[in-house]
Amino acid sequence: QGIFSTLVPYSDSDSDCSYIIPMPTSQQRRLGSSLWGETSTESSKSPNKKDSAVLRTTATVSNSHDHIEQDSSSDAGNWSPESDVEAEDARGSKPGKRCEKENVAPASSSIKVMKTHNKGKRKWDKHQYCVYCMKTYAKLPRHLEQVHLKEKEVAEALSYDKGSCKRKELLTLLRNKGNHSHNVEVWQSGSGCLIPARRTPFDQSHDEFLPCNLCFGYFSRDNLWKHKKNCFMASESTMKDKRHQSTSALLLPFSQEVSQSFKDTVFASMTYDSISFAARHDHIIVQYGERMFAKLGHERHQVGYISQKMRELARLLLKIKETKPDVKSLYDCISPKQFDTVLEAVRNLAGLDPQTGKYKTPSLALKLGHSLQTCALIVKAECIKSEDPVKEDQADKFSKLAVIEWAHKVGTGARTTLEERKWNKPNMLPLSEDIRQLHAKLSEVIEEKQKLLALSDDVTAWYALAEATLSKLILFNRRRSGEVQRIKLADFERRCHDQGNDDVMDSLSSWEKTLCNKLERIEIRGKRGRKVPVLLTKEMVQVMELLAAKRTLIGVSQTNDYFFARPNFSSMEPLRGADCIRKYALKSGAKHPSNLTSTKLRKQIATVSQILCLKDHELDVLAGFLGHDIRVHREYYRLPENTLQMAKVARLLLLMEKGAVGEFKDKKLDEIEVPLDDPSYTDESEGESEVPYDEEDLETEDKEGQNEIHESEEESDSLASTKKKGSPKQRVRWRRNQTATIEKHFEKHIRVQRVPRKSECEALRRKYPALATKDWKSIKYKVYNIIQQKKK
């Protein structure tokens, strides 16, 4: 092999093959000088001395090689990465200069990351952990073959030929599992050395590494997606997973034992960053999440809400640690001594402006107040179980402080900010023309895509048809978008076809019976667990039956039980109704597409329905259909407040200004008519409040209609009449100015088709001199005739 080279086995190989590495130059010089110095003195005595010296040198190198093999195999189990950590900590390193001779990169925490220390050439010093005996070995394949040959995984790996790809992959998997077990212990203990799949010569933090959930090798978070793309354990199903970091982070240890379902749902959906890292390693936050998961976890759409609440607490904890580094967890914060610290952290996190007292995110401050109260209860329950009266008392006092001081130090300012942001904010309802355009656009898309999907299994057509149908269901039923999008396939199959009780059907009008025959009904879960209906027309049922028949053919996962399921990447989620209706609102050409949302559509029907003057039981039916409590319906879904204040309350203010409130005793607000004598209250377009009198402007009898009842000015209040039978009736024609005055004054009565009372007619006669010649009955019958004419 040569004098200045050494035979060294390949440490990463699974065979006993060896290779030659050159001897270091300094060692060559020392060995060469001793070699040639010895032979020069003895060469004169024996010409064969040089050969013998060469043999002795070769033997020395061979013995050295045996010593290397012995250290790297037999005694390798005595080495551990922590020994290098201790050596580095003892030696120390110069600031601003990388430690190139140590195996471990210095980090801010006590967890180090192993790195290379090659200088000019590679140094073969990497050791791997055995998954069975948890000792380190430079030649792990040889150790597995000699010691653990009876293990199933080892026997399977060694059954393949040496050098084969399958053998290398299985041995790599065993090596990664052993290193992963060691790394998990390092994470749990908070100290030690992390072994990555590939070492670098640079300093790296342990937070930057995540294990591959397929092969268990540790890779940089930023490059994890690249590895998974080419991982030897990847399959076609695993390639569809796009949340690489969140999925891989589930392999890391948690602060406490958590259920597997909680891991696979909440933490798997949570973005892996410093916030989620803090959440998963704080046992109070984890308990808070599990508490919510036990209550809401069965509802899949609530997973994001649970994740959000946990991240809010984690953000608060990180903010507290910025000012109080001695605080390690949220458990330490639940103490009366830390109450002011927590209070200040909440203010800073919510963006309090000390000059104005306004919050940038006031809702966050309110949410954290409720969450901290729950965390205090969790700590108190934990202390009761562990019989820790001291900490229990601290948690109880923290809760009392929150009740006493939180409202005026945080809550009041946050609520004030929220309320003031609503001031002078336009509250626009959808225009009828915009709704008509949206409906026309949806009908056009549904008709086009329905024909296309009936002839082929086009995924794009199915997707577009599902979006348009979902939008139309929201528009027609005025339902919350989230409720409609979560309709299950089983709900559609169990839809109601029968028409109900026969006695109830007999009480309906023919038009209402026709509606019942044309509509079908689905009952779904609404807000707060209420049962709410979704009505379907015959056309909607036909489209939905086509979607249900084609869903398997276009690739919708069979485990996705939502009717409007996503057909891509084996998703388990439904389409988003808000996104669908927003998409088609923009395409419809509506004047105000931003107003076409499910919330504003619901408010429109609830608000406009008040114009119809519905009775109490009718309001109950409407509120039940919308999924409202009747009290909520009356409080929030009313006519616009600015309109009511200007049109209704202004009447009372004008009466008080004139001092004439007593004249309208026992009257409703709608029955009060106040003369607008002040020019500032008069609209120029409306002219004078009283129509001018014109003697020659007479109204002919023919224009009054056949049903008009004419009364004589001299007719008494008594119903008895002394006129002879068949004698001609004395008729007095109504002047145009008199008719116009009545139509203007009783405009609301005519609109709602209600005849005025005697007191209202008398008030009109006193108010307008032009009507002084008419008695109250004539005015009443005149209004009645006008109403009858409007009906024709």
Image: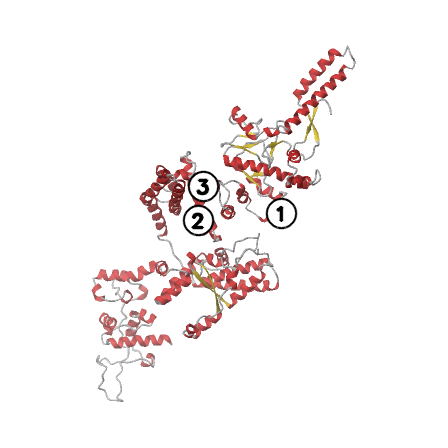
- Residue linked to disc 2: 292
2 or 1: tag closer to the N-terminus:
1
The quadrant of the image that shows the N terminus is: top right
Which quarter of the picture shows residue 375?
A: top left
Q: Considering only vertical position in the picture, is 789 above or below 353?
A: below
Q: Where does residue 453 sit, x and y in percent of width and height?
A: 59, 62
Q: Where does residue 133 sit, x and y in percent of width and height?
A: 59, 35
3 or 1: tag closer to the N-terminus:
1
CB-based contact (under 8 Å), mark 2 and mark 1: no
Mark 2 is surrounded, within 10 Å at the Cα level, by few (under 14), some (14 to 19) or many (20 or more) other residues, namely some
**15 displayed left or right of 285:** right
Q: Give SS at disc 2.
A: helix
Mark 1 is surrounded, within 10 Å at the Cα level, by few (under 14), some (14 to 19) or many (20 or more) other residues, namely few
- Residue linked to disc 1: 235
**Which residue: 32% across, 69% down?**
748
- Residue linked to disc 3: 283
Q: CA distance from mark 2 to mark 3?
A: 14 Å
Q: Amino acid at mark 3?
A: His
